[in-house]
Image (cartoon, rainbow, N blue to C red):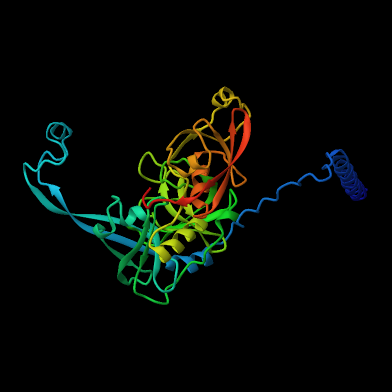
Amino acid sequence: MTARRLILAVLLLACGFAVGLVITARLHEVDTVAAQDTAPATPAGAPGPIALPAAGTLPDFTRVAERTVPAVINISSLQVVQRPDSPFANDPFFRYFFGDGNDMFGTRRGVESSLGSGVVVSEDGYILTNNHVVAGGGRPLEQLPAVTVVLGDRRELPAQIVGLDAATDLALLKVEATGLPTIPWGDSSSLKVAEWVLAIGNPFQLNQSVSLGIVSAVGRSNVGIAAYEEWIQTDAAINPGNSGGALVNGQGELVGINTAIFSQSGGYQGIGFAVPSNLARRVVDDLTRYGEVRRGSIGYVEVTPVTTQIATELGAPDARGVLVARMRRDSAAYEGGMRPGDIIVDVNGTPIEDVGRFSRLVQDAPIGSTATVTVVREGRRVQLQVPVERRSPGA
């Protein structure tokens, strides 16, 4: 009798457990349907949710690095200089009274060195780097230091300076070699903010280092690094020695030449700047063909940003552009009808947003052409036809 009761109790317990499972499953289905019914519908045409990559699925850039690193080389330049042989040469109190050029104690010979990176842009030995790597003091070409490059295969070769462009901080070198590895040119105008990029160079003399980051911004200007500014900003680590190195996109294409960093310590702080490849390519073409970069000019015209207050005072509260502060009467701009007080709002149909864009548009205009410049004068829009002249070298 006891065994029969035990078996009956076990059967009842098993039945109760099975019923509980069925009820729980039904409740889960009801909750799921209710949640689906109450979820907000996505409006027609609205963007759907962004699908983030799963953990462990970040892009693999190993093949890109294998293909591009050999084309980034080390550059060193040495120059013998005369330095004051004075124990007080670095004393500001002494220099205040006796000046920097005193030879009371005579001079002694010393060596100035510069280290940086470069990118091989042709198989027959053309190398692109920064102007400040090979000509840091703005010296004439004949006074520039001897330049030596170390290729990816460790060959050390002397390099000839083909041409310099201080306005973009670029320089073109040539070594006697053939069959060199290169990085194909990319289209920097297609870069998007947050796109992956690699910075390749020789930071702190650590050869062929690769760092990874994203494009932080494009078209940066008015940074104060160079006269012609259209920077790619990146957070890929750029440090001293990276100057002249390659900024490469995810397809292994050259999209920029690493040039400068914004830093309060002298090291990486997540803000680096690179010359866009489209600009660099134009500079290479001109330096190869002419030995200099030829740019357009409309003569001496000094422009300043237009604030809301200035625009209102000039009777054009809605105008956006740059203000002609002063100019020379013998300039092409004056000849074309431009006058101080004009607000320049576009050049050849391209709106002017700041001083940097105005300067770039004028310099990029074909020499000998006529630029259509729209200005606001006394509240009215006026179109001017301004001749474009050749900009004087070094201007």
Q: Residue at x 44, y 70 (%)?
A: 122
Q: Position of residue 92 (x, y in %)?
A: 18, 34
The answer to whether residue 10 is above or below residue 311 is below
Q: Considering depth in this image, is 144 or 67 the residue closer to the camera?
A: 144
Q: Considering depth in this image, is 236 or 179 the residue closer to the camera?
A: 179
The answer to whether residue 200 is above or below residue 309 is below
Quadrant of the rendered image containing residue 289? bottom left
Q: Position of residue 164 (x, y in %)?
A: 36, 57
Left/right placement of residue 319 relative to residue 203 reads right
Q: Position of residue 40 (x, y in %)?
A: 83, 39
Left/right placement of residue 256 relative to residue 41 reads left
Q: Residue at x 62, y 46 (%)?
A: 349
Q: Residue furthest bottom?
A: 179
Quadrant of the rendered image containing residue 262? top left
Q: For residue 193, say whether it is visible.
A: yes
Q: Considering depth in this image, is 170 or 306 the residue closer to the camera?
A: 306
Q: Position of residue 77 (x, y in %)?
A: 27, 59
Q: For residue 231, say whether it is visible.
A: no
Q: Residue furthest left?
A: 105
Q: How many marks?
A: 0
Q: Residue at x 62, y 26 (%)?
A: 317
